[in-house]
Each structure stands twice: as C-alpha cells, then as structure tokens.
Image (tube, helix red, strand yellow):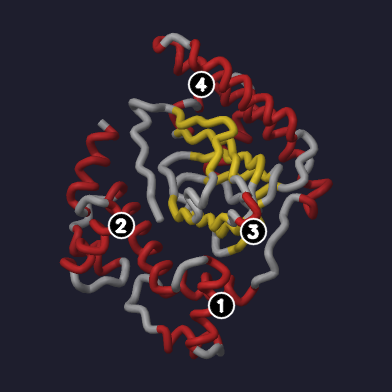
Amino acid sequence: MSFVINNYSEIPLQFAYKRKSVNYEHKETFHSHLGVELLLIHQGKGTMIVNNISYDIKPGMLCIFQPHQLHHLQLEYSEDQCFERSMAIFEPTMFEAYFEKWPALHTFYKYIYLGKLPFPCLYAIDDLDILDSVYSNMNDNLPNVLESEKFEEISLFLVVLYRALKQVWDKLNVHASTYQTRRKNYQVEHILDWIEAHYTVPYRLDDMAKDLHLSPYHLSHLFKKATGMSISEYITTRRIHQSILLLTTTNKPVSFIAEEIGLMNCSYFCKVFKSQMGVTPHQYRKRALRSND
C-alpha cells in the first residue's frame, strides 16, 4: 500500500508508456495523487475500487482519477499474467492556460478534474488506437526534447490527449452501457459505504456487522476475498489518506487531525502514519510545503 506526493514544480508530468509489472510486482496498491491521472491499461486482470465501487481490470480500459481520489488496485498474476499500462499524472492548473484558445476543449478539461464524473473507468473504447498513439508519440518525443522546451512539449501532449479523450467521452451519451462494467459485488460495496460513513470514529467490527446484518466472520471473509486486505487495514489506509489531505491543505494541528480521522491517541496516529509513510506527520507536512514553494 502506498501514497504519492508529487513535486510538480520539478516534475510537471509523470509519464510512462507500456510500463510492465510482472512476478507479483505491485500486486496491490492503494493510493492517490495530488493531480489528475489518466491510466490506459494494455494488459492485466484484477479488481479496482474507486468511490466504493469495484470494477474489473481489463485490457483496453481507460481510468480517470481526479486529484486526491483514492483508488485501490488488486492485480492477478496467475498464468503468467502481466500488468502493462500507460499513464500521465500532472497538476491540471499548471496547463489550463494552454486550453483557453479552444472553449469546448477547455470546458471539457475543467470538467475532467473538477466535475462529478459518472464513472472513472471506461471500457470497449472504439478509439483506443488513437489514445495509444498519443502516448506512443510522447514516449518517442520526450527523450529528445530540450529541458527549456519540455513544458511546451507536455502542454502539446495534453492538448492532443484531451482532444482524443473528448472524442471518446462524447460517445458516452449514445453507448453509455458499454463504458461501465462493474463487478456485481454489492455486499462489498455496502461495506465500503459503511466505512466511508464511519471511518472518522473508533471502529468496532461488531457494530459494522450489526448495521449490515452480517456475521463478523462472514463480513471479514467477504471483504478480504474481494479486496485482498482486511477491513482494519482498509480503514487505517483510508484514515491515513484523509490525514494527508488535511496535512497538505489545512493548518490544523496534528493532534486535531488525529481526532478527525477517528484516532483519539495522537502518539498512536503518528506511529501508524510513520509505518505507512516512512516519515512523521510533521515531516510529511514540511516536505509538502517545500514542494509547493
């Protein structure tokens, strides 16, 4: 499980084309980004949880993650499976000026990072080759770009990428049913909804089981099978994610943040935070402030 903090002033774009993970590498990740992530999956199988809904990971799938949007990937590596993807992660406000000459594209650009998207995962994309070629061209061009021209090259890449993405998105009104394929695992989604509503208070499995009308054992087994982690691990990670948001966007004392995420003991919160993030909450906040200077 991991989180990402990006220093966009130094690296305005995190980019990869057909990056592969094999041999159970990154089997399970649970993270978010300060910016937008556009993830194109070429190969792979597994489950993705976004906004408390689970989706099948399939080749040809395009995922759109908005800033601070928590997403959990559990990959399957049986039968020599490989997870291959292309990605672009960036801070959208840094490049917005480049879209202002095209009003319709500019509106779409803002909608993708600010709007309430109906779903984060798109399937059965007719224009998949076009999206692939945009990533491929950027992969070919980027190594040869002068440092002084890199920001311009990234801007041009994003304009072309969003133009292709808009063509895909505009077809959703006609073929919406082909773009959202969910696992029919509604019990797990009810558990996720319960966690989202209660993670800021001390957690008791018996309370959850009573509210969801399931036995504690069945509840734990069901969640572990579907997500690859225990309920307590998920709640801890959800709490740490929220604490990161509060550390980087508010001036609230660490002790207040601990209480807001359901951990009444500040020392315990700092211990849990350091075990997941490698630094204390205070150190994380200082690093985040330096990155934004």
User: Circle 3 sits in a helix, a strand or a loop, which is it?
Assistant: strand
Residue 266 or 104: which is nearer the viewer? 266
Residues at marks 3 and 1 touching, judged by CB atoms closer than 8 Å: no
Query: Who comes first in sequence, dot 2 or dot 1?
Result: 1
Q: Which residue is mark 4?
A: 154
Mark 1 Cα shell of 10 Å, populated few (<14), some (14-19), many (≥20): some
Image location of residue 220, percent across then percent down: 49, 80
Query: Who comes first in sequence, dot 2 or dot 3?
Result: 3
- Residue drawn at x 62%, y 50% is 80
User: Circle 2 sits in a helix, a strand or a loop, which is it?
Assistant: helix
Q: Which mark is residue 69?
A: none
Q: Callout 1, which amino acid?
A: Leu
Residues at marks 3 and 4 touching, judged by CB atoms closer than 8 Å: no
Q: Callout 2, which amino acid?
A: Gln
Q: Which residue is mark 3?
A: 55
Residue 172 higher or lower than 93, as above or below: below
Q: Callout 4, which amino acid?
A: Ile
Residues at marks 2 and 1 touching, judged by CB atoms closer than 8 Å: no
Q: Callout 3, which amino acid?
A: Tyr
Gap in Å between the C-alphas at discs 2 and 3?
26 Å
Q: Which residue is mark 2?
A: 276
Image location of residue 189, percent across then percent down: 58, 71
Q: Which mark is residue 222?
A: 1
